Amino acid sequence: MATEAQQIAQRVPGEKSSFPALVLLAGWLIPGAGHLLLGKWTRGLLLFASILGMYLIGLGLQGKIYSTSTGDILDILGFAGQLGLGLLYVLARVMSWGASSVTITLGDYGTKFLVVGGLLNLITAVDAHSLANGRKASA
Amino acid sequence: MLTHFSAVLLFSLFTSVVFGITQRAQPRMMIRFGAFCFAIFVGSTIVISWLMYAIKH
């Protein structure tokens, strides 16, 4: 009987299925969740730890949590990057974590950690999607 | 509190892990590419830092 991982490996590019979309969505909302859904536990946990680490350091350094309310194009770009953090971004907004503006020198570093963490999470979600639809070889 | 250099090391480590896993298909190549990215991140930071020091002095 084929396991889920073997079935994933046998999928061919272009095949219609909602599973890759689910993997993409899960990977965006929770870092590494896309890989976990594919049964790639080590990769999923490493990705989760890395992106969570970026997020926690960013918050610890009092990085700025962007919103679109200012209308500034640079703020909107920062918001787009941080939105890649998925539920972690929502959590920071709901709990009012991070800073509303950069007040210390290290806060600028913290902001970069948060934005890059979001962008890295998007890369991981797309990677999980590529594994799920067979575009990337599954080893 | 993190120093600038420890922040660079952690940034490089986490970013290299993600690059290694997502940009290569084989586990062995993931480790090699991740280590390469880490070395490039940290090495270029040190080189650029010394360049800025030389420009200032």
Image: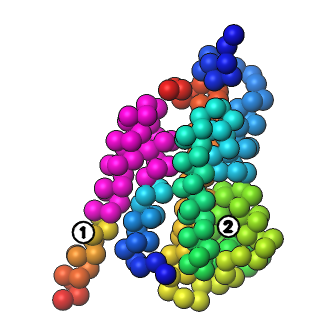
Say which quarter of the image contains residue A61. bottom right
Q: Amino acid at mark 1?
A: Val
Neighbor class of circle 1 (other Cα within 10 Å; few <14, some 14-19, many 20+) is few
Does the magenta portion include B32?
yes
Q: Position of residue B37 (x, y in %)?
A: 36, 52
Task: State whether residue A76 is above or below residue A11.
Answer: below
Q: Main secondary structure of the magenta part?
A: helix
Q: Position of residue A8 (x, y in %)?
A: 65, 23
- Image disc number at residue A79: 2
Q: Position of residue A91 (x, y in %)?
A: 76, 66
Q: What span is colored magenta in the figure?
A: B16-43
Q: Secondary structure at mark 2?
A: helix
Left/right placement of residue B39 relative to residue A123 reads left
Asked whether residue A43 appears in the rendered view, the answer is yes
- Image disc number at residue B47: 1
Residue at horizontal 63%, vertical 46%? Answer: A32
Residue at horizontal 50%, vertical 86%? Answer: A105
Instruction: Report how many numbered discs are placed on residues in the image.
Output: 2
Q: Secondary structure at mark 1?
A: helix
- Image disc number at residue B30: none
Q: Position of residue A69 (x, y in %)?
A: 77, 76
Does the magenta portion include B28?
yes
Neighbor class of circle 2 (other Cα within 10 Å; few <14, some 14-19, many 20+) is some
Looking at the image, do the residues carrying marks 1 and 2 touch, with CB atoms under 8 Å apart? no
User: Observer-nearest residue: B47 or A59?
Assistant: A59
Q: Amino acid at mark 2?
A: Phe
Q: Spatial distance from mark 1 to mark 2, Cα to Cα?
A: 31 Å
